[in-house]
Image (tube, helix red, strand yellow):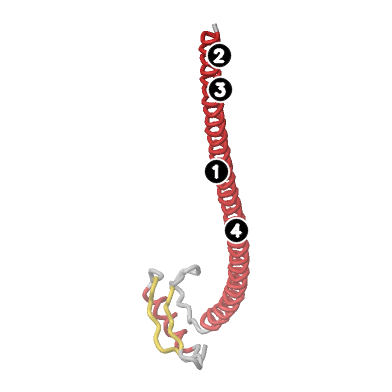
Amino acid sequence: KAEAERKAEAERKAEMEQRAEAEQKAEAERKTQAKLKALAEKKEQAEEKERARQKAQAEQKLLAGQKAQAEQQVQAEQKAKAEQERARAEQKMQAEQERARAAQAAAVGKEVAEYKAKIIAKIRRNIVMLPDIPYNARAEFDVTLLPGGMVLNSILVKPSGSAAYDSAVERAIKKAEPL
């Protein structure tokens, strides 16, 4: 009986040792699993932080790109506005120059018209009209004058239809010198 009790005791002891050993192994396994789980969580957190950092960087780049694009657009608008202002100023200046040229041309035209009228009047006073020439006869001459008003040459441009009248006008041009 004592031996059976020792055997039973030894079996219980062995069983308890096996249980303790199994519990230690299970505990060690749980600790290992917990460590692996903690490492996996840390790795996941690190990856999440990296993704967040990359996302933030991408957003910053996007914002920087948008800001640069907005600045470029503002600069382009300012440049276009300055170009429009320059074009308006140039158009205004051209219009002023055109008005000045037109005023000068009108003044010159008026002077030329007055000078031409005086020359025609002086030549008409010197035309000797023949009785067979119609009253409304008209001949046009191209007259080249020297600076002092002397006639360099006169060329018949549009004849009147009467050779006598044409030669009378040509003589009157010579006779009216200086013009």
50 or 16: nearer the viewer: 16
For badge 2, the amino acid type reads Glu
For badge 3, the amino acid type reads Ala
Among the 4 quarters of the image, the one containing residue 13: top right
Q: Name the residue carrying label 1.
A: 50
Mark nearer the N terminus (1 vs 4): 1
Q: Name the residue carrying label 2.
A: 9
Whole-angstrom CA distance, mark 1 to mark 2, is 60 Å
- Dot 4 falls on a residue whose secondary structure is helix
Mark nearer the N terminus (1 vs 2): 2
User: Who's the residue at 46% across and 90% down the image?
Assistant: 146
Whole-angstrom CA distance, mark 3 to mark 4, is 80 Å
For badge 1, the amino acid type reads Glu
- Dot 2 falls on a residue whose secondary structure is helix
- State if disc 2 and disc 1 touch (CB < 8 Å): no
160 or 103: nearer the viewer: 103
- State if disc 1 and disc 3 touch (CB < 8 Å): no
Left or right: residue 131 versus residue 24 is left
Whole-angstrom CA distance, mark 2 to mark 4, is 96 Å
Crowd class of label 4 (few under 14; some 14 to 19; many from 20; radius 10 Å): few
- State if disc 4 and disc 3 touch (CB < 8 Å): no
Relative to 163, is 57 above or below? above
Q: Name the residue carrying label 3.
A: 20
